[in-house]
Image: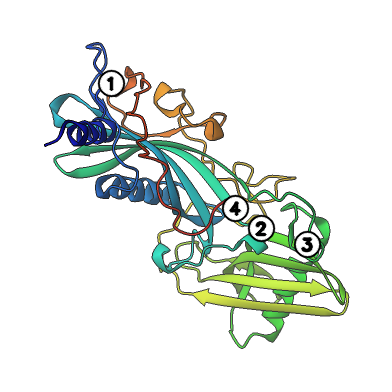
Amino acid sequence: MRPVAAAVVLGLLAGAWAQVPPTNFPPVSRPFCDSADVEEAAFVGQDYINAQHTYGYKYILNRIEDVKVTQLSGGEELYSMELDLLETKCHVLDPTPLANCTVRPKHEVAIEADCDVLVKKMAGVLSPLAFKCKSKPDSREEFCVGCMELLPLNDTDALQVVHSSLALYNNKSTDNSTFELLEVGRMSSQIVSLGAKIMVEYVILETTCNASGSCIPLNFTLARRGFCTGSGTPVELYVDCDIVEAGAAPMDTSRKAATSHPSSGGPGHKHHRLIRLHDPSASGLLSESQESAEVPIVKRQVPPDVEAIVMPEIPLAPGIQLCPGKIRHFST
């Protein structure tokens, strides 16, 4: 092999799997973001985040921003990743598989999430350890006349559209059951020819009503749920609900009917933030992405030897571009 060619090959190999020389650090490598192993670990992290997120909508992987792999004792590997996720139109209680969920488009004010994720690999098996995320609406450079604008989840006018459209559904539906509001998922407004139009998305729960007309919600595990879209203008009210059977998807049985939840979309918030308060202790392993630096950590079963690791910066060979990976849906 010619000297120049040999130097190029060695440079590529050194960049793709750069090792840390100091003996006081575990061996750390920098694989390609779009390699099969990294993608598999990223999907495990994505599914774990969705499993912990009990309010709002499911999120799907859009891009792997960065990754480092640490070799632990006993043959374990630790994937430390920065992931870009996008909100879908599937609520977390919707049984639709994530792969079949529609990513919310930009013109509907897409929500993106920047997440730091830890995934352990042992004997070929991937297990999620911890994550922290920060979610926010896709930024716009200037106000767009006629475009959708997110409203706070406690907006008075939008809540009126929610309750009015639900009443319309209960009155017009041929279903023998009456449904009540479980959660407001999203509210937005748009200027149309008829004036201001308010669009709402919400989840409803089946109730049982007595002869006097008093209704109480059924046991959460036994009740059917509905996913509704509604809209209201000064002259028009619209509603459509998809009803699914009880037990069609895993549910948190501790939940109760509410218009919002303080840990995910409290007063003034315009979307259900991708946050779950659980063991919010600090860890140097999840401090790499500045996007999610202020968000509490969700952590489980992090081994003691993992806690002591401080992830070093790894130099790459000139011209080597390992990350970020490919964009799967659209640039945010």
Amino acid at the residue labelled 3: Ala
Task: Give me the C-alpha separation between circle 4 and circle 1.
Answer: 35 Å
> Where does residue 23 sit, x and y in percent of width and height?
22, 12
Question: Disc 1 designates what residue?
Answer: 304
Q: Is residue 201 left or right of residue 234?
A: left
**How was the colour assigned to the protein in this rendering?**
rainbow
Q: Earlier in the sequence, mark 2 or mark 1?
A: 2
Q: Earlier in the sequence, mark 3 or mark 2?
A: 2
> Looking at the image, which residue sits at the far left?
1
Disc on res. 109: 2
Disc on res. 111: 4
> Where does residue 24 sit, x and y in percent of width and height?
25, 11
Disc on res. 168: none
Pointers 4 and 2 in contact (CB under 8 A)? yes
Q: Residue at x 52, y 36 (%)?
A: 277
Q: Is residue 284 shown above or below 77?
A: above
Q: Is residue 283 left or right of residue 198?
A: left
Q: Residue at x 24, y 20 (%)?
A: 26
Pointers 4 and 1 in contact (CB under 8 A)? no
